[in-house]
Amino acid sequence: MKKAISTILTAALILAATGCGGQEGNVSQENADTAIQSEVTEEMEVTVPEGKKGTLEIWTMFTGADGAAFPDIVDKYNATNPDYTVLHRPMNAEDLYLKLQMAEASGEGIPDMAMNHIERVPLYQEEGRLLDLTPYLEDADIKKDNYNSKAWEMTDLNGGHYGVPLDVHSYILWVNMDLYEKYGLKDLDDGVLTWDELAATAELVKKDNIIPIGLSWLRPIFLGSYAQLGGTLSDDGINPSFNNDTAVQVLEQYCSMVQQGNTQKDGDDSWKAFLGGTVLYEPEGVWMYNAVRDSGLNIKAFDFPVFDSETKGNWTSSHQFTIPIQPQQDEERVKACLAFIKFVEENAADWSVAGLVPAAKGALESEDFTEMPQYFLAGEADELKIYNYKYYGYAVDALDKVLGDIVFGKISIEDGLSQAEMETKDKIAME
């Protein structure tokens, strides 16, 4: 496994160093390693008072508008005077996955816990990078019945269990209700916006220089629509198969909106414009709740736009606590990690203030959560779209590189999908 990871990292590190200001075409492996290690050191200077027996380190991707809630939970846990206090190191998701691979390849600096998106867990488990939690769960009183069943079951893999869900989080539709009411709109009377309704409304609001709909993160925007139409990333679970007529149909919809002037212009920040009051509809993550709240605007949350009002579907994922395998696994530290995870379960309502849906069932009827704008998502378990594809990470990384160019007319739909699928196949071949 380490040999395979090292091969992937060699290329990844060079690209990362170049992207951070290294000299293109003249970056040695040594320079790449030094550049990344420097970045790790500078980003992760965080301290916490040690517990009676030491400190546990957890890496998360909570750097956005959800970034304030998790440290509060950690502080609350550390205030209980545990044997092991918890040190939280947040970083963006791409850095987390790269640095975790680096640490595991070297056998040094591996965190005690790492937050993973659920789509990444199957591949990491297959590569032998995650600890099977089965022998520890009963003693920790962490039970499947206490969690969202789908988010739990997707980390039941090959006879073991490899993750404990923190939440289920979706890419939804935020709506500026002052603008909605100003134009006397009825689009959301049934709770969902169709693309046909959007097209009609666009002509009404554009004359006042209001952007009908923003397109921010195109990955979940594409995947949400693609899943509504029955699209999958792989037909056989191994080979990518998203270069198809369904994907073309989805992208034609978005290209058409851009061509008609119903979105922001290429290069503009639609989320910033939305918070500035000049965008009517904005697809974005539930995790942006704190930014919505702080904007002072009259904003409400709805399901992601649809082709057919009878077929709802939001791109949805789950953050999962995982325990990476160490060169020498310390049983006591593993049990201490699960004690922290159990504490989070018991205080999961605190996580709802980040805008996400707690995976712990006990939090779902708490007063804190029932008053949150994302509360309606708790009753939509049947339509969750968590992508269960082993090579999900490869596929979406490749799609990220082409979706913007496709939607804003820089490359054709066919060429973009072909490029993304081929890149996915190439990465799988490197395995």
Image: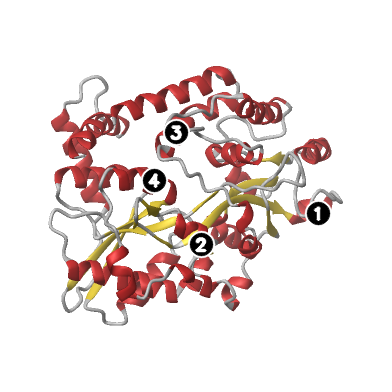
Q: Which residue is mark 2?
A: 149
Task: Identify which amino acid the numbered label 2 is placed on.
Answer: Ser
Query: Gap in Å between the C-alphas at discs 3 and 1?
Result: 34 Å
Which numbered disc covers residue 395? 3
Secondary structure under tag 3 reads helix
Task: Identify which amino acid the numbered label 4 is placed on.
Answer: Arg
Secondary structure under tag 4 reads helix
Residue sitting at 49 percent across and 33 percent down? 234
Query: Gap in Å between the C-alphas at discs 4 and 2?
Result: 18 Å
Colouring of the image: secondary structure
Q: Depth check: 137 or 283 in front?
A: 137
Q: Residues within 10 Å of mark 2 (few under 14, many from 20)?
A: some
**Position of residue 162 measured from the top left corner of the image (x, y, whole percent):** 34, 56
Q: Which residue is mark 4?
A: 120
| Image side of residue 198 versus residue 359, left or right | right
Q: Which residue is mark 1?
A: 190
**Position of residue 30 measured from the top left corner of the image (x, y, whole percent):** 13, 32
Q: Is residue 304 above or below residue 209?
A: below
User: Do we see residue 50 in this rendering?
Assistant: yes
Query: Gap in Å between the C-alphas at discs 4 and 1?
Result: 35 Å
Q: Is residue 288 above or below residue 87?
A: above
Q: Are marks 4 and 1 in contact (CB under 8 Å)?
A: no
Residue sitting at 40 percent across and 54 percent down? 155
Pick whichever of labels 3 and 1 is earlier in the sequence. 1
**Position of residue 359 measured from the top left corner of the image (x, y, whole percent):** 49, 64
Q: Are marks 4 and 2 in contact (CB under 8 Å)?
A: no
**Position of residue 245 measured from the top left corner of the image (x, y, whole percent):** 63, 24
Mark 4 or 2, closer to the camera: 2
Task: Identify which amino acid the numbered label 3 is placed on.
Answer: Ala
Q: Quadrant of residue 293?
A: bottom right
